[in-house]
Image (tube, rainbow, N blue to C red):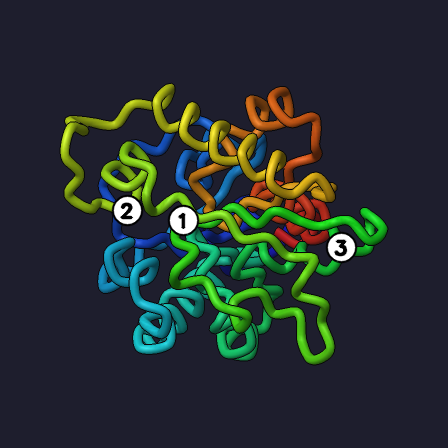
Amino acid sequence: MLKGRTTCGDSIGVLMLNTSFPRVHGDIGNARTFDFPVRYKVVQQATQGTIVTEADKARDLLPYFIEAAQELESEGVAAITTSCGFLSVVQEELSAAVSVPVATSSLLLLPMILNMIGRRQVGVITANASVLSQRHLMLGDGADYSRIVLCGLQDCPNFRASILGLPTEGVSGFDVKLIEQEVVARCQMLCQDHPELGAFLFECTNLPPYAWAMQKATGLPVFGISHLVEMLHQSVRLAT
């Protein structure tokens, strides 16, 4: 047992965007998603209206994320992740700012998935494909980007209104079933257009609640932030 701390046991710290939509079971912002304690830290200056709609906003807000990450480390967490896959662009800076492991985004899983599925393609399901760039994917020089198929949800009415917080005609509230239908339908279309798909990766941390429906509808494996957090926990759980 580590000494000198008021609380112990929450091995994973999560840097959260400042949002107000419901966090259903399976979402990284719902603590019941995990079978181990997590510690949350909201970065008040960061909202989905900035990080997800402006490509470089994560870098503009980096000092606030660094401050929050350092607070989580001082509070005793053994590893840190975030509630937004777009923060992959500051992976290097955040991991350098603390002494515990940092995994900013499920996109860190992308090289592993590509190696697991031969020469097939990966469908990356993102909150906003118009903003997600090759820098976010972190594949490095010489990567074969033809194996990456981006699929954005920014035009899906219920996802757009509920998760991105953008005005959308005809949408009055957060409806889990309608969002699930939009996600599944978009991914089924992706499978039809790209028969070489071998897996899906959720960039967006709000999508894991719909993974089971995706698997059932497409027959393909689905990866997301929860898998990365589970791996982090298993690697550091004895350190808290």
In the rendered image, the vertical position of residue 167 relative to residue 146, given as above or below: above
- Marks 2/3: CA–CA distance: 28 Å
Kindly identify which residue carries mark 1. 127
- Marks 3/1: CA–CA distance: 21 Å
Quick one: label 2, few (<14), some, or many (20+) residues within 10 Å?
many
> Which residue is at 43% across, 69% downward?
70
- Give the x, y percent position of residue 32: 47, 29
- Marks 1/2: CA–CA distance: 8 Å
Q: Which of marks 1 and 2 is nearer the N terminus?
A: 1
Q: Which of marks 3 and 1 is nearer the N terminus?
A: 3
Kindly identify which residue carries mark 3. 114
Q: What residue type is labelled 3?
A: Leu
Q: Do the residues labelled 1 and 2 touch (CB within 8 Å)?
A: yes
Q: Is mark 3 on a helix, strand or loop?
A: helix
- In the image as oriented, which residue stretches furthest toward the right? 118
Locate residue 95: give its quadrant. bottom right
Q: What element carries label 1?
A: loop
Q: What residue type is labelled 2?
A: Leu
Q: Is residue 237 left or right of residue 134?
A: right
Q: In this view, does 93 lie to the left or right of 41?
A: right
> Which residue is at 15% across, 27% downward?
172
Instruction: Tell me the tag on residue 164.
Output: 2
In depth, the one of 1 and 200 nearer the eye is 200
